[in-house]
Image (spheres, helix red, strand yellow):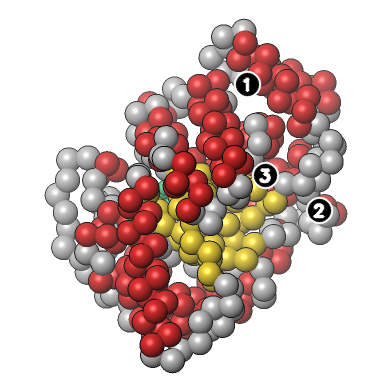
Amino acid sequence: ALERYASIRDKDCVTACGTRIGLHMNAGLMADLPSLENSGAEGVGLFRTELQFLVRNQMPKRTELAALYSRVLDAAGGKRVIFRTLDIGSDKVLPYMKPNDEPNPALGWRAIRVGLDKPGVLRMQLQALLRGANGRALTVMFPFVAQLYEFREARAEMDKAIAREERLGHVLPESIEVGAMLETPSLAYAPNGFFREVDFVSIGGNDLKQFFFAADRENERVRRRYDTLNTSFLTFIERIVQRCEKAGTPVSFCGEDAGRPIEAMCLAAIGVRTLSMRPPSIGPVKSLLLRVDLGELRRVIHEARERDEQSVRPAVMDYLRWIT
Ligand code: PEP
Ligand code: MG
């Protein structure tokens, strides 16, 4: 697949109407990093740090993690990497952590909730990230933030970690950006302050869709019932993008749908300008985006909504047949 798209690999992703869309890749292990070069991704839009914790049988040490993060940044060769802090707990139980018996793990004690309630591991990870950056730019985001105050608390942990590094005389990153993943509908309705205070927002479409439709993302039966191109869901995403734009806050989309060409093009049509996906999806997504007029597509989407259609997919497929 990578070879097929080799001719457009180094081409900027600019749509037929002249809009630039940033295409980034999702990663989680060192082994993923060579794809940055092969796929033509502009950077790593989502580095899932929990994978490093899940492949071991004991808690990694801060020095080991710092060395790993440093190697990730070396391999990225100056391209931006967004490190997501640990998204564990509930279903993703670490072998060396006491398991938690929870009836609804996806709605349970996970991700930033664990990080804020028991901050030891989060603090260790933030220090490792600051050390690993070793004077370079550092970008960090927190998973599963559901309300403004959770973001504030998490950011306060980062500020404390920075102050500690300074006190110890360690070199600080040349710049530090701190963002939040928007994965719960509650955050879409957060006070304006949330959108102003975050350095960026990354929409975690997998979880956001699961909670929007109340349909388990692991359960094929209920998952397939709800189309990502459902008019309600697209309207919801559009609203989030507008709130970010109004606050002047960059927003990206990093769920699996970012890597599906038709979904990706619809996200772009409703205002998403940065997508992060599995590396092999970059070619196909770019190939389609290069041919799309986002204004026309937006009109197709809005008209389908005006006709009370459940999903804009049929209308979008018609449009596609017309342009290809
Ligand atoms: C998401 O929820 O969309 C996401 C990118 O995070 P994960 O798939 O790791 O939950
Ligand atoms: Mg998620």
Three-letter amino acid code of the residue under disc 3? Arg
Which is closer to the viewer, label 2 or label 1?
2
Confirm whether residue 268 shows in the render.
yes
Q: Nearer the viewer, residue 135 or 193?
A: 193
User: What percent of the width, then of the height, locates residue 45?
Assistant: 58, 57
Marks 2 & 3, CB-CB < 8 Å contact: no
Q: Is residue 194 above or below residue 260?
A: below
- Locate residue 300: give its quadrant: top right
Q: Name the residue at 27% across, 75% down.
A: 58
Residue underneath mark 2: 12
- The mark nearer the N terminus, 2 or 1, is 2
Residue at image position (85%, 37%) is 16
Disc 2 marks a residue whose amino acid type is Asp
In the rendered structure, the answer to whether residue 270 lies left or right of residue 165 reads: right
Per the image, the residue denoted by label 1 is 313
How crowded is the residue under tag 1: few (<14 C-alpha within 10 Å), some, or many (20+)? many
The mark closer to the camera, 1 or 3, is: 3
Rendering coords of residue 49 (x, y %): 43, 65
Determine the CA span between mark 2 and mark 1. Answer: 27 Å
Q: Which mark is residue 273?
A: 3
